[in-house]
Image (cartoon, rainbow, N blue to C red):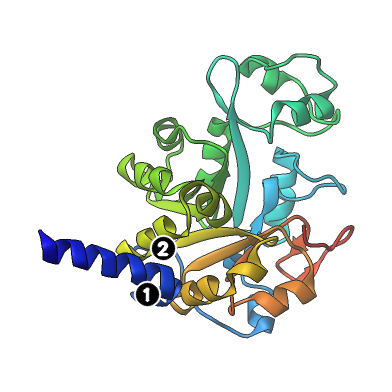
């Protein structure tokens, strides 16, 4: 038993002292697309670099998670689309950031709508709300697209309701949820770095990264400065690291490839490689 104890202590010390330097450089398996480095001029128009945040901005509005935002983002060259998925009072997965935001957008006084109520009420009197079935049909018609989810932890319902698992990227918020997502059929879980560090601690996160190559990582712009070495190590492994949220060209150019691969963006035009209009900011 003594050699095993010494080995464990040595491993623990190496993680604490070396940290991310001990993450092995291995090829990322089963990646749906390459996340290798390229010039800024190529990166700014690469549709795999940008995720339309909450479906993308529409008419200056963020977080609508609406059909109109989705269609507009697709026309602007996005091919990855993030939606916040939560459950209605009768258990249907629908696209909404939270029920407070939904009430503000609809003027409804319903605390938690049923699926029928959610579908019947327009957002800001003009935009159409989406449920998981709507998203499944939309992505079926556009085979070059990927759905990125936020908030949903019912992986069984998500995988069962979305027919395109090879084009599904699911953000998870802890090491346990990462492993559970894989066990429950999610092919491409995306580890939220800030949340997992807060929940599990750095040692546990690094242990996961050492145990298996992680293809997708989401990172808040607020912690990039304090996690430069860890992010740079992952980028050397061509991990697909996406920062949220930025449509600011100078910020993106400064961070692409060195510490992140891409970004969640509200109003980027992927066809022109520029911020389209409104607030071209990072937050």
| Residue at 34 percent of width and 75 percent of height | 24
Q: Quadrant of the N terminus?
A: bottom left
| Residue at 58 percent of width and 69 percent of height | 227
Q: Is residue 22 left or right of residue 240?
A: left
Question: Which residue is the extreme one toward the right?
Answer: 278
Circle 1/circle 2 CB separation < 8 Å: yes
Query: What residue is disc 2 on?
Result: 206
x, y percentage for residue 120? 72, 19
Viewer-nearest residue: 23 or 43: 23
- Above or below, 67 against 202 in this view is above
| Residue at 85 percent of width and 21 percent of height | 107
Confirm whether residue 254 shows in the render: yes
x, y percentage for residue 198? 55, 50
Q: Is residue 204 left or right of residue 103?
A: left
Question: Which residue is the extreme one toward the left?
Answer: 1
Using the image, tell me which numbered label, if any, was put on residue 22.
1
Q: CA distance from mark 1 to mark 2?
A: 8 Å
Viewer-nearest residue: 255 or 2: 2
x, y percentage for residue 150? 58, 43
Q: Is the residue marked by circle 1 packed among few (<14), some (14-19), or many (20+) residues within 10 Å?
A: some
């Amino acid at each position: 038993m003594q050699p095993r104890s010494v080995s464990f202590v040595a491993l623990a010390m190496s993680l604490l002292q070396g940290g991310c330097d001990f993450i092995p450089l291995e090829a990322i398996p089963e990646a749906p697309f390459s996340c290798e480095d390229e010039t800024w001029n190529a990166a700014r128009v690469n549709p795999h670099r940008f995720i339309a945040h909450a479906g993308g901005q529409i008419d200056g509005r963020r977080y609508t998670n609406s059909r109109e935002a989705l269609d507009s983002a697709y026309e602007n060259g996005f091919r990855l689309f993030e939606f916040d998925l939560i459950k209605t009072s009768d258990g249907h997965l629908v696209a909404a950031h939270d029920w407070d935001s939904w009430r503000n957008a609809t003027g409804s006084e319903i605390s938690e709508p049923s699926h029928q109520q959610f579908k019947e009420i327009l957002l800001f009197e003009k935009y159409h709300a989406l449920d998981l079935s709507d998203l499944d049909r939309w992505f079926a018609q556009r085979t070059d697209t990927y759905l990125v989810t936020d908030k949903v932890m019912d992986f069984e319902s998500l995988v069962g309701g979305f027919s395109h698992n090879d084009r599904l990227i699911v953000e998870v918020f802890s090491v346990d949820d990462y492993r559970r997502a894989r066990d429950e059929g999610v092919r491409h879980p995306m580890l939220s770095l800030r949340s997992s560090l807060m929940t599990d601690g750095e040692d546990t996160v690094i242990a996961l990264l050492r145990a298996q190559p992680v293809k997708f990582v989401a990172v808040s712009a607020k912690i990039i400065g304090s996690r430069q070495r860890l992010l740079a190590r992952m980028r050397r492994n061509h991990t697909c690291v996406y920062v949220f949220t930025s449509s600011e060209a100078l910020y993106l150019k400064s961070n692409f490839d060195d510490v992140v691969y891409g970004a969640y963006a509200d109003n980027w035009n992927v066809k022109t490689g520029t911020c389209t209009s409104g607030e071209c900011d990072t937050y």
